[in-house]
Image: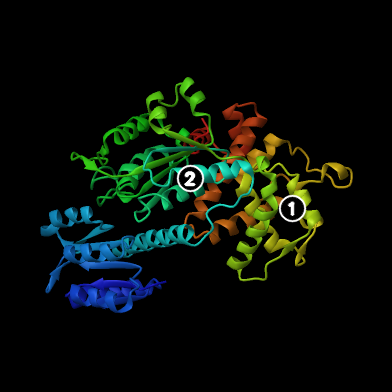
Amino acid sequence: MKPIWIADDDQSIRFVLEKALQREQMPTRSFTNPREVLAALDEEGEGPQVLVSDIRMPGGSGLELLEKVKARHPGLPVIIMTAFSDLDSAVSAFQGGAFEYLPKPFDLPKAVELVRRAVEESQREEVAQESIDEAPEMLGQAPAMQDVFRAIGRLSQSNVTVLITGESGSGKELVARALHKHSPRANGPFVAINTAAIPKDLLESELFGHERGAFTGAQTMRRGRFEQADGGTLFLDEIGDMPFDLQTRLLRVLSDGHFYRVGGHSAVKANVRVIAATHQDLEQRVKEGVFREDLFHRLNVIRLRLPALRERREDVPMLTRHFLLQSARQLGVEPKRISDAALERLGHFGFPGNVRQLENICHWLTVMAPAQVIEPKDLPPEIGPLPADAGTVATPAGATTGARESVASAVPAAGMPSPGDWESGLQADAMTLLLSGRVDVWDELTRRFERMLILTALDNTRGRRIEAAHKLGIGRNTITRKIQELGLE
């Protein structure tokens, strides 16, 4: 990890922060004025992980330093320290892109926690930038994928709103990143948010930010995703699951670019291109009255349909070899090869979890396959036999297309094999998320686990919640709350 830079002319502040951060295994480097910080940036080129700067220092202000640092490193989180008398100045710093402000005198544990959040944000930015700059955007030779590539090319000089449709795991975010990378906004930020993964009562704050004191726990003002994406692209994944009342707010932003933070009274303007994605039939959602028709038409300017992997089976061998190589690089091991017989069996699999499921299977094979050459017997049980030799290998019990698809969305690498094999699938899925650089792996896998348990119990009890709660060993209030949090209603 790169060091945390601290800029303050007060030696005691520098000392206290240095020691507190070093106790948390965060390296630090200190400066007494803005000139020293800018000189270090000129000398070394690479910036810090996070910059913590006082607002008043000899030789220049923290706000001027913020402006100059952001011009060189737009994604660098900057925390401005301020006395209460300078609070208005600190709040205005958000217009210049400050991550947060830290009022003096500050509570040391809270200061450390704020720096930790800034580090996580910085690491997320680095992972996202790596995936945009270095990773292959998309692979595919099938005609359906060539149509997608051509559409991205035609949209390369446009800022038009795009709606991406396709099944879960088909690569909708990769298309969104490609649209951003090849657009006039390529130098701006790419910010992604899954509207289905955030509880309803937090989603408004995530999208639009909040003012200090807007609700319990809002101790500082926070910029939302729209502000973070200013000058760039905001990717709204699973837009079909957005709560109805928030759809109204989103429509207003798309109409005139203005919005209010939660608890705010001043309009904020954001210059953002919106790309939305969904696996649902939005026209049907409109007919059911759960999605606004005017918002649908506002989003549906250009629609890109991403094909399922079963519609582009000729791409399976190329994608498999790519993911095996990628997994080996991430784990620091020798890449495994795959036999033609194993590729043939993969090619006949339906892949209800699409490209994401194939990627997870390749991670699983990299870890679990016993030899350097992967044979059909090494494939996970969810793949099943080829149609021609169906009698020689048992198909997992109950693994219908619908059941497999449900399980794939919960733990894509696991499928529905024998009772002990789901643990291997969970291990592979956890490895995939950890290797991706995400910092919410516990929450993500817990959410999937709870979702699958509740869906299975409700299926078993034909939708009777109280009976399902009793069988799961939880209270009826708990299952009702979980159904709401997980968007299962």
Circle 2 Cα neighbour tier, 10 Å, few/some/many (<14 / 14–19 / ≥20):
many
Q: Please tell me whether mark 2 or mark 1 is closer to you in this view.
A: 2
User: Which residue corresponds to mark 1?
Assistant: 380
| Horizontal relation, residue 236 to residue 420: left or right | left
406 over 94 or under it: above or below: above
Q: Quadrant of residue 45?
A: bottom left
**Residue sitting at the far right:** 391
Q: SS of the residue at dot 2? A: helix
Give left or right: position of 296 versus 136: left
- Residue 59, placed above or below residue 415: below
**Percent position of residue 303, x then y:** 48, 35
Mark 2 to mark 1: distance in Å? 35 Å
Please tell me whether residue 236 is drawn above or below residue 93 in the rendered image.
above
Q: Is residue 154 left or right of residue 15?
A: right
Residue 443 in view (yes/no): yes
**Identity, as a three-letter code, of the amino acid under mark 2:** Ile
- At a point 23% along the width and 40% down the height, the residue shown is 263
Three-letter amino acid code at the position of disc 1: Pro
Placement of the N terminus among the 4 image quadrants: bottom left
Q: Is residue 451 above or below residue 435?
A: above
Q: Nearer the viewer, residue 113 or 431?
A: 431
The circle on residue 152 is: 2
Q: Looking at the image, do the residues carrying marks 2 and 1 touch, with CB atoms under 8 Å apart?
A: no
Q: Nearer the viewer, residue 466 or 312?
A: 312
